[in-house]
Image: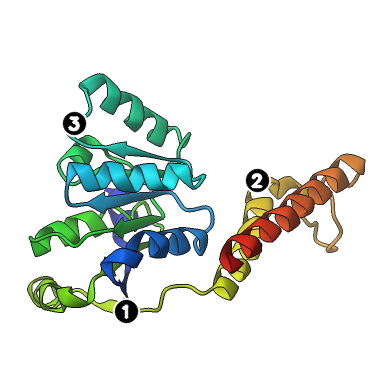
Amino acid sequence: TDEKTESSRAYCHIQGYVVGYRQKKEALKRLIDANPNLYSIIFCRTRMETQEVADFLMQNGYAADALHGDLSQAQRDTVMKKFRLKNIDILVATDVAARGLDVNSLTHVIHFSLPDDPEVFVHRSGRTGRAGKDGISMALIKPEESRKLKQIKSDTKIEMVEKNIPTGDDIIKAQVGGVFEKLLTEHEDFFEFDNNLQYFGVLDEYYHLIVSSLLLKMMLFLQIIVVQINV
């Protein structure tokens, strides 16, 4: 079908970040902060780890929730509905619990823990890079997992780019870009041009109020980010 043809054109970029176990949660925060407007599933190995990571993110102000086998069916349905409606941006899940969830618009998949089965890594990553849009699959890798990573690469023939955890400067630059990206996508009608390169969108006080409000929010947000990084 045309949809399948379009989806096949999308590409999933796979990135690896080597980080010690004690630093994984803080590293996860930096990856999220360096990828504004993220809509992602974070995969964990166990139910306990899934809940711990979700709790950590929620306590730090992220719109996240957990999906795992210790939840009742009603609770799982509620969490999945919130994620589909984008009331939350981040779903922390086990592989088994995420099987019933089919979302085509994920921007990122994050492997908080590597799976034992290489094919599971491929399946996780395949949840992004759909519907004609490229996606990013990011793996947090402990130094002692080099053998497991080598096995995954060998069995699946994936190409992984090893990268460093984002710095404070990286995050600030990404957040500034994210604010303007959101401004352009949510208010496209304000940035339309005619053939003479003149605005024909709404150019009145309402437009200026929206831009000023967004820029003010950006400045306040960046001040918070800088304080958090310095702490």
Q: CA distance from mark 2 to mark 3?
A: 38 Å
Q: Give the residue displayed 33% in from the left and 32% down from the top.
A: 80
Q: Are marks 1 and 2 in contact (CB under 8 Å)?
A: no
Horizontal and vertical percent position of residue 168: 56, 71
What kind of residue is marked 3?
Asp
Q: Quadrant of residue 153?
A: bottom left
Q: Give the residue displayed 23% in from the left and 51% down from the top.
A: 44
Looking at the rendered image, the quarter that the C terminus falls into is: bottom right
| Residue position marked by numbered label 3 in the rendering | 70
Question: Residue 172 vs residue 81: left or right?
Answer: right
Q: Give the residue displayed 62% in from the left and 70% down from the top.
A: 173
Pointer 3 or 1: first along the chain: 3
Q: Which mark is residue 186?
A: 2
Q: How many C-alpha atoms fall within 10 Å of the one at disc 3: few (<14), some, or many (≥20)? A: few
What kind of residue is marked 1?
Val
Q: Nearer the viewer, residue 203 or 139?
A: 139
Q: Which mark is residue 204?
A: none
Horizontal and vertical percent position of residue 35: 49, 61
Q: CA distance from mark 1 to mark 2?
A: 32 Å
Q: Element type at marker 2?
A: helix
Pointer 1 or 2: first along the chain: 1
Q: How many C-alpha atoms fall within 10 Å of the one at disc 1: few (<14), some, or many (≥20)? A: few
What kind of residue is marked 2?
Glu
Q: Nearer the viewer, residue 21 or 99?
A: 21
